Image: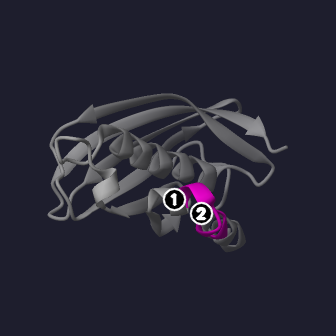
C-alpha cells in the first residue's frame, strides 16, 4: 500500500499491536475483538449486546462509529514505525443500514501514511456481509511519548 512505513515482514510489531488491543481496558469494555491484523489492514468485530443498542433497539450509531474508528486507527497504527503513534483528527461516517443484533465487523484499511498525517478508510458489515456503514478518517502522526 502506498505510503506504508512498516514492512510486511514485521511480525514482532504486529504481535505487539495485537497485545496492545488484548490488554486495552477500552477495547474490553466496548466488547471489541481483534479478528485479524496485517500491515495496513485490520479487522475488528463486535458481538452486539443489549447495552450497545439505542432506545429504538438498534445498534447505536456511536458504537458503529467507534468500531470504524478503531479498525481504521489500528490499520494506521500497524503501518507506522515503532517510534510513532497517531490520533484521530477527523472521522466521517456514512450510516447505510441498521443492525438489531448479531455480530458486526469493521475492516480498516490504511490508504496513505505521511510524515505528519495519515488517511484510512473502513467498512462496517453485519453478519450477512451487508454494508452497515462506510467511514474515512484523517489521523495526526506523532512521535511516541
Per the image, the residue denoted by label 1 is 29
Residue 27 located left or right of residue 45: right
Main secondary structure of the magenta stretch? helix
Q: Position of residue 130 (x, y in %)?
A: 15, 54
- Is 108 a magenta residue? no
Earlier sequence position, callout 1 versus callout 2: 2
Q: Residue 48: tell me if it is visible.
A: no
Depth order, front residue of 42/63: 63
Q: Residues within 10 Å of mark 2 (few under 14, many from 20)?
A: some
Q: Which residues are magenta?
A: 19-27
| Number of marks in the rendered image | 2
x 27%, y 32%: residue: 94
Q: Nearer the viewer, mark 1 or mark 2?
A: 1
Q: Position of residue 98 (x, y in %)?
A: 16, 45
Per the image, the residue denoted by label 2 is 21
Give the CA separation, mark 1 to mark 2.
11 Å
Amino acid at each position: 500500500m502506498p505510503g506504508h512505513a512498516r514492512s510486511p515482514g514485521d511480525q514482532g510489531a504486529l504481535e505487539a499491536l495485537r497485545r496492545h488491543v488484548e490488554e486495552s481496558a477500552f477495547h474490553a469494555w466496548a466488547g471489541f475483538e481483534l479478528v485479524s491484523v496485517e500491515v495496513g489492514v485490520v479487522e475488528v468485530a463486535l458481538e452486539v449486546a443489549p447495552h450497545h443498542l439505542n432506545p429504538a433497539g438498534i445498534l447505536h450509531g456511536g458504537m458503529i462509529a467507534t468500531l470504524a474508528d478503531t479498525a481504521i486507527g489500528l490499520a494506521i497504527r500497524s503501518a507506522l514505525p515503532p517510534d510513532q503513534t497517531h490520533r484521530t483528527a477527523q472521522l466521517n461516517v456514512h450510516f447505510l443500514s441498521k443492525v438489531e443484533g448479531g455480530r458486526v465487523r469493521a475492516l480498516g484499511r490504511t490508504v496513505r501514511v505521511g510524515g505528519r498525517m495519515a488517511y484510512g478508510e473502513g467498512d462496517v458489515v453485519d453478519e450477512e456481509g451487508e454494508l452497515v456503514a462506510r467511514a474515512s478518517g484523517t489521523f495526526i502522526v506523532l512521535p511516541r511519548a
